[in-house]
Amino acid sequence: MQKPSLPKGTRDFGPLQMARRNYILNIIRSSFELFGYQQIETPTMENLSTLTGKYGDEGDQLIFKILNSGDFLKKVNEEDLREGSKHMLPKISEKGLRYDLTVPFARYVVMNRNEIAFPFKRYQIQPVWRADRPQRGRYREFYQCDADVVGTDSLICEAEIILLIRSVFAQLNLKNYSIKINNRKILTGISEVIGAAGQEGPLCVAIDKLDKIGWDKVQEELISRDFTAESLVKLEPIINLTGSISAKIEFLKEFLASSEAGLRGVSELEEVFGTLSQMGADLEHVDLDVVLARGLSYYTGAIFEVKVADVSVGSVSGGGRYDDLTGVFGLPDVSGVGFSFGVDRLYDVLEELDLFPEQTIESTKILLVHFDQKGYRYALGQVQKLRAAGIKAEVYPDSAKIKKQFDYASKKNIPFAGICGDNEIEAGTIALKNLLSGEQSVLALDQVIEALG
Amino acid sequence: MQKPSLPKGTRDFGPLQMARRNYILNIIRSSFELFGYQQIETPTMENLSTLTGKYGDEGDQLIFKILNSGDFLKKVNEEDLREGSKHMLPKISEKGLRYDLTVPFARYVVMNRNEIAFPFKRYQIQPVWRADRPQRGRYREFYQCDADVVGTDSLICEAEIILLIRSVFAQLNLKNYSIKINNRKILTGISEVIGAAGQEGPLCVAIDKLDKIGWDKVQEELISRDFTAESLVKLEPIINLTGSISAKIEFLKEFLASSEAGLRGVSELEEVFGTLSQMGADLEHVDLDVVLARGLSYYTGAIFEVKVADVSVGSVSGGGRYDDLTGVFGLPDVSGVGFSFGVDRLYDVLEELDLFPEQTIESTKILLVHFDQKGYRYALGQVQKLRAAGIKAEVYPDSAKIKKQFDYASKKNIPFAGICGDNEIEAGTIALKNLLSGEQSVLALDQVIEALG
C-alpha cells in the first residue's frame, strides 16, 4: 500500500482552482479571438534537435528529457558510461518536453508555411516544463499563454497589443496597472549617444535590474563592463526621466538627435501612439519607460511589460517585436511581435485583490434534496426540466439525512437547494432555498426556472 | 540549418483543427457541467511509483519515462549497465508521463479526500501519452475526456450517463448511433448458468471479439480455454438474442433464474431504465447488448459502449461501474461509475459525416480592407467600434493589393470584407461584401453591426 504523492514542482488543480483559471483563460481567449488571433496547439514532446541550442546552455539543462522507449541501452557501452551524462544523453534520449511556446511556434510556422495565411495571428495556451529548482510561485509545470503576429511589420500590431491588454484587464476588473512600453532602437540610440555604441547588450542587462538593485549598483556593474564614467554621466538624465509621455518624447528627440536608430525608435513609438489615437483610443495605463529592456536580446523594436500596482507579484504580461523568428529552422526574415500573459501570476493577483467573482465557480446552481423515496422520485421528474432550461442542476443521488445533502451543497458551493417534501409533491412545487441568505419560498417549476435563469 | 520535424506519433493542431476540436469539447464540457460534473486537472508528470503496476506489464513498458535532471548517471556503475535497461531504469528515471486519466484521478481522490464533496462528480480533459507503435488513427499523444462519479452506488449515475451521451450527441447533430448497455453481473450469471462459474473473465475476453471474429472463432477460443461443448450450446441463445429491450429482459429473467448475481444484474438494468422513465426520458438509442464486455475486468456493474452507424471508426464512448478505484493507494471501498468520450474519434466521425458547422471556425467575422493610407486610417477608426459590439474584426495590417487582402480573408475563412474606399470614407459608410455569395451593399456602421451581430 503506497502513499501517493506529486512530483515536486507540480500541482493538481481542483474544481475551484479550475473554475478560476477558466474564468481568466476564457476572458483572454475571447479577447484574442475578438482581435483575430487563431488558436494552435503543438505536441508536448519535441525532438531534442528542435529544442536544444535555443535557450542557452542553462536552458538546455533545464529541458526535461524523455528516455527512449524499449531497450534504451541498446547503443550504449561502458566507454559511454565513463564519458558521463552529457555524452550519454543523445544515446538514450531523442525527445524533450516543451520548454516554451515560442520555439514550437517557430517550428510550426516553418513546417506549415504554405498553408498559413500570413500575416499569421496565432495564440497558444499550453503548459511548459522546466527542470528548475521549485520555489514558492515557481513550478516545473506551468501554463504559458502567448499571442504573436508574424509576417508583418505594421505597427498596428503594437497598438492592438495595448488595446488587447486593456480589454482583458477591464474584464478582469483590474484597474490599477501600467503597460510599460519602450523600443529597442531607443536603447541602441542611448548607447550610441553616451559613447558606448554597440554596447546596448550589457547596457540592457544592467539597467534591466534598476528596479531591483538601484542606480548605484547598476553603475558599478556598467563600470565593471568597461563603460566610462563619462558615459554614465551622460546616461543619468535617461535614468531620471519623468513626466508625461509627450514630454518624454520631446526629451528623447533632443537627446537622441545624433542617433539615427534612436530617432527611428522614437518615431515608431509615435506611430504606435498615433495609431491608437486613430482607433479612437487614449493612452490610459500606458507608460513610456525608456529603461525597460526585459533582458532579451532578440527584441528589435517595441518592448512591453505590464505591472499591477499594490500586489506582490512582478510583471504579469510582457513581449516585444523581433526580426527573425524562424531563421534557425531555415526560413529567414519572418518578423513579428508577440506577448504573453502570465496566467499563474494573474491568478495570484486576482486572489490577492479578491477580484474573483463568486459565480466563477461554474458549479451546479441548484441541488434537489429529498426526505424519502417518494421525494427522490419526484426530484428525478424535475431535474431534467431544469437542465432543459439550461440550469445546472443535480439530484442528491442517495437516501441521506437532509443535513448531509445540505453539506454536499455547501462544500460544492451550490447556491440553491430545491426541497422536495410531501407538501411540494402534493402541490407540484419546489421549496427554493437560498443557501447563503436562508431565504425560502415555494415556487412552481417555471418560477424556479425564472428565478435561477 | 536544420529541417524541423515532429516526433513520430505526435501532431500539431492548426487553427481549423483547433476550432473543430473546441466545438466538440465545448459541447462536452457544458453538458458535463449541466449535470453537475466539475473539472480537475492533474500534472503531466507523475511519479513512476504512482504509474507502474497499474496497466499490466505491457502498459508499464508503454509509459514514457523522464530522465532525471542534472547528472543522471550519478548512481550508476558498470555493473548496472551490464544488467540492462530494466535494471537501469529506476536509477536514472523517477517520473513518467500520464498514461490515462483514471490512475491520476484515483491518486487525486486519495490525496484530497478530506476536501472533496462526495459523491464527487469530476470531469477531466487532458492529453495522455503512450509509447505505442504509431498507426493511422493511433497517436502517441492524444486527448482523453473522462467523467466519473465516485462515492455512491446510486443508479441515477448510470441513467444520467445515458442522458449525457444523448445530450452531447444531439448537440453534435449525430442521429444514428446506439448506446449499448450491459451489466457485468449478467455476464457472471451467464457463466454460472452455462456451467462455467467463475470463468466470466475468459468468457468476456472471448465474446468481446464476437463483432470482429464471429461466433465460430469465439467458440474455438472458448474451447481452447476449457469451456465444454455443452456450455457453448447453452451459451448460444445468448449470442443470438435479439428483440426489444423488454423482450430481452424477460428472456434474461428466465435464463438467469438460477443465478443470484445474474438476476441482480437484470434488476440493476431495470432500475436504470426505470430511473430514466421517472426522469421523463425514453430509451431512444439505448440497446441492451448482453454480450457487451469491453474486456475490462475491473467493471462490476453497468458497462457502456457507444457506436455510431455508417462510419468506419469503432466505439466513440464507453465506460462502466467499478467497485474499487483507490484501493491501490490505500483508500478502499471507493466505488463509482465513469465513462469517456473519444475526442479524436468523434472528430473523425463528424468529419466523415460532414457535420462540422461552417461557423465552428471561430474566425474573424469581418476583415476591413483598404486601397491606400487614407482608407487604412479610416478602417482603423471603424475596427474598434465593431469589436466593442462583440464582432470579431480585423484591419489588414499592411498596404497591399486588394487581391492579397481578399486572399488573406479567404485563407482564414473570414466570411465578410468591409471595403473602405473613397466613396465610403466620404459617406461615412462601409461596403459590406459577403465573400461567399459575392453580394455587396453599402451600409452605415451600425447597420454592419446589425447585419453581423
Image: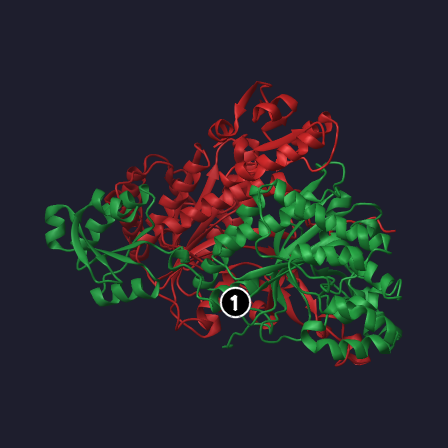
Chain colours: A green, B red
Count of picture labels = 1
Residue drawn at point x = 83 percent, y = 45 percent: A333
State which chain disc 1 sits on. Answer: A
- Does A11 sit above or below residue A381? below
Compared across the picture, whether A296 is left or right of A348 comes to right
* Residue denoted by label 1: A348
Closer to us: B271 or B10: B10
Residue drawn at point x = 75 percent, y = 43 percent: A153
* Relative image position of residue B99 (x, y in whole percent): 59, 60
Residue A44 seen by the camera: no
Residue A192 seen by the camera: yes
* Relative image position of residue B316 (x, y in whole percent): 50, 43
The 10 Å Cα crowd at callout 1, few under 14, some 14 to 19, many 20 or more, is some
* Relative image position of residue A348 (x, y in whole percent): 52, 67
Compared across the picture, whether B314 is left or right of B406 comes to left
Amino acid of disc 1: Asp
Image quadrant assignment for residue B251: top left
Closer to us: B214 or B298: B298
Compared across the picture, whether B11 is left or right of A369 comes to right
Image quadrant assignment for residue A141: bottom right
Closer to us: A10 or B88: A10
Image quadrant assignment for residue B288: top left
Compared across the picture, whether B74 is left or right of A428 comes to right
* Relative image position of residue A79 (x, y in whole percent): 89, 74
Closer to us: A294 or A368: A294
Judged from the image, the secondary structure of the residue bearing numbered disc 1 is: helix
